[in-house]
Image (cartoon, rainbow, N blue to C red):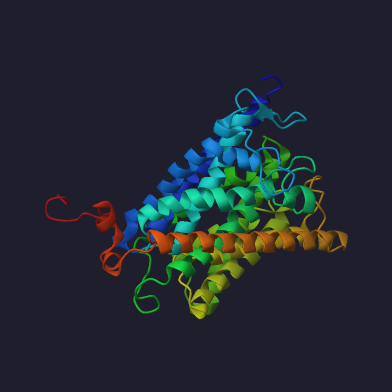
Amino acid sequence: MSGINTGDTAWVLMSGALVLFMTPGLAIFYGGMVRAKSTLNMMMMSFAAIGVTTIIWVIYGYSIVFGKDTGSGIIGNLDHIGLNNTIDQVVGGEGHTIPTLAFVMFQLTFAIITVALLSGAIADRAKYSSWVIFVGVWITLVYAPIAHWAFAGQGGTGGWIIDKLGALDFAGGTVVEINSGAAALALAIVLGKREGFKRDPMRPHNMPLVLLGAGMLWFGWFGFNAGSALGASGLAATAMINTQVATAGAAMSWLVYEKIKGGKATTLGVASGAIAGAVAITPACGYVTPLGALAIGLVGGAVSAWAVSRKYKFNYDDSLDVVGVHGFGGIVGMIAIGLIGTKAVNELGGNGLFVSGSPSLLTKQVIAILATAAYSFTATFIIAKVIQKTIGFRVRRDVELEGLDTTTHAESAYDINPFTSR
């Protein structure tokens, strides 16, 4: 492999490791948010996402996402089955050439974290075996097409969102965030509400775990966003500072929202706000200034806090707030590009409405949002319904009431008795 930029390669490899680190972080974040009786099950759902997605990605997932487009703008071909034609190959150009396998690994970690996010919508009530099957089907039929649409830029012959529509998404506002938010809503509707929803207290059982998990996600998000520059460059530096600024801003605006609405600023609020800010800046981190990132974070935190409260009004049980945080946060970031995006940050980007005076980019962003949400929700709803009607997706009532840790995994997160506590 000639022409490899070793600095860029090192950064992309490190970024892949950072993004993979986010999924155990998510497991800890989600594990602390559920009730103690289902902690391990919640964490196991994230680890299943790592295993199943990795296998699929190697066999055919990478190929149908980043293989040459079939001409439709919808899906890639099968040229890279089993990662064929990737070893000793390179991607990039203009001094930013990296090994293809570094890119393969980096993009794999995106697929893993996206499907793992969905588990939060169905906490405490999903059959583990059905979840494992769902992960494989969803990665194939939902994640792969949307990732191709928005990430597979091939000079006008790639995915329709990036190459034909011309919408901008630097690190996954459509592919990861809006996709997971819409899919989470579909799952929550199909599986129904937890026993005791809006009646029994379902507060997080371990807030230190929640904060630890949020911190791990915050740390890993630098690889997520700055790594999407695919090089150790000025653009990566911009994406990194923008990620920090927006995440911090949203953590504070969520607390302000909480204080105004309920009189208390909570630890769950600061953790959720931080995630909401990281989500909101994800699509925009390579297209806006640091001040723009601050505005996105402040707005994203408040909007996500409001959106989370709506699940009680509309009576759907998105257990761990995937819809409100990831779905709405992603929408904020995508729209922000159409408003305050500027080519002064990224010449390959675009000027938003407030910069150019033209609504053209904003219109493209809205189309990308609607198409992603509509496809993800519809396809996920159908997949979940088929699983529910065939092998069953929700556990029996007695299993749910007892807790999924002991009934499914024959273990418990906290085995405290006279023999083990000595």
Answer above or below: position of 403 versus 44. below
Q: Residue furthest top?
A: 2
| Picture mark count | 0
> Does 46 sit left or right of 401 as displayed?
right
Q: Observer-nearest residue: 311 or 221?
A: 311
Q: Observer-nearest residue: 335 or 137?
A: 137
Answer above or below: position of 418 versus 20. below
Q: Residue furthest right?
A: 357
Q: Observer-nearest residue: 252 or 363?
A: 363
Residue 326 in sight from this viewpoint: no
Q: Residue 399 in the image: x percent, y percent?
A: 27, 64
> Does 303 sit left or right of 363 as displayed?
left
Q: Residue 190 in the image: x percent, y percent?
A: 47, 68
Residue 50 in sight from this viewpoint: yes
For image coordinates 69% across by 19% down, the residue present is: 2
> Does 28 sit left or right of 261 as displayed?
left
Residue 365 location, quadrant:
bottom right
Q: Residue 150 in the image: x percent, y percent?
A: 69, 49
Residue 371 location, quadrant:
bottom right
For image coordinates 59% across by 35% down, the residue present is: 104
